[in-house]
Image (cartoon, rainbow, N blue to C red):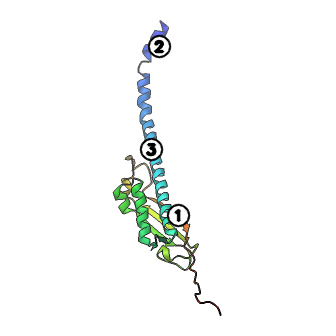
Amino acid sequence: MRFTRQTKTRRGVVAVEAAITMPLLLVLMLGVWEVGRIIQIQQMLVNSCREGARFAAGGYTNGTPVTNAMVQQAVRDYLTSAGFPTVAVSNAQVSLSCLSSPTWTDPYQALPLDKFQVSVVIPSGTAFNSLRWTLLNQITSVRSLSASVNWMSLNNTQIVVNTQLPY
C-alpha cells in the first residue's frame, strides 16, 4: 500500500524534469553541431589552399606557365568540388603572394625554393551564412573564415648550355 501511494505522488516528475533539461540539451547539441561544421569548413579551406599551392609550386602545367589567376581558379574549383555553395565560392577572396626576394607576381616567374603563400577568406555576409547549418548567428562569434598555407616553389633552375665545342 505504501509503495502505491508514493508512485501516485511522483507521477509528473519525469515530465517536469524533461521539460527543464530538454531545452538545455537541445542548445548544447546545436552548439556542438555548429562548432563541428565550422571545423569541417575550416579544414576544407586549408585543403583548398594546399591544392592551390601545389598547383602553383611547379610553375608550369603541361608546358603552360601557371599564372596567379590559374591558382585562384584551382582553389575555387576545389571548393566547388568539396560542396561549397556557389555564393560562397564566388565571394571567396583568394590571394597568392610571394614571400621571398626578388618578388614575382605569377608562379612561373619564381626561382627554385622561393617561398609563397596562398590564402582564402570567406567574408561575413551571405557567403558565410550559406555555409552555416544552424541559425545560431547570435551565439557564435565567428563571422568569417580564413586559411592560408606557406609553400616553396619547385620550379626547375634555368640551365644555359654552351653549344659551341671547345677547340
* Structural distance between the alpha carbons of marks 3 and 1: 27 Å
Vertical relation: 147 (above or below) 31: below
Question: Which image quadrant: the C terminus?
Answer: bottom right
Dot 3: few (<14), some (14–19), or many (≥20) neighbours within 10 Å? Answer: few
Q: Residue furthest front?
A: 167
Residue depicted at x 52% and y 69%? 57
* Structural distance between the alpha carbons of marks 1 and 2: 66 Å
Q: Position of residue 44 (x, y in %)?
A: 46, 55
Location of residue 162 (image quadrant): bottom right
Q: Earlier in the sequence, mark 3 or mark 1?
A: 3
Q: Secondary structure at mark 2?
A: helix
Q: Earlier in the sequence, mark 1 or mark 2?
A: 2
Residue depicted at x 43% and y 64%? 74
Q: Earlier in the sequence, mark 3 or mark 2?
A: 2
- Name the amino acid, label 1: Val
Q: Position of residue 150 (x, y in %)?
A: 54, 66
Location of residue 99 (image quadrant): bottom right
Mark 3 highlights which residue?
A: 33
Q: Is residue 62 left or right of residue 165?
A: left
For the question of whether residue 126 can be seen, the reply is no
- Name the amino acid, label 3: Trp
Vertical relation: 42 (above or below) 112: above
Q: Secondary structure at mark 3?
A: helix
Mark 1 highlights which residue?
A: 149
* Structural distance between the alpha carbons of marks 3 and 2: 41 Å
- Name the amino acid, label 2: Gln
Dot label at residue 6: 2
Please report contact status of discs 3 and 1: CB closer than 8 Å, yes or no.
Answer: no
Q: Secondary structure at mark 1?
A: strand
Dot 1: few (<14), some (14–19), or many (≥20) neighbours within 10 Å? Answer: some
Vertical relation: 147 (above or below) 159: above
Please report contact status of discs 3 and 2: CB closer than 8 Å, yes or no.
Answer: no
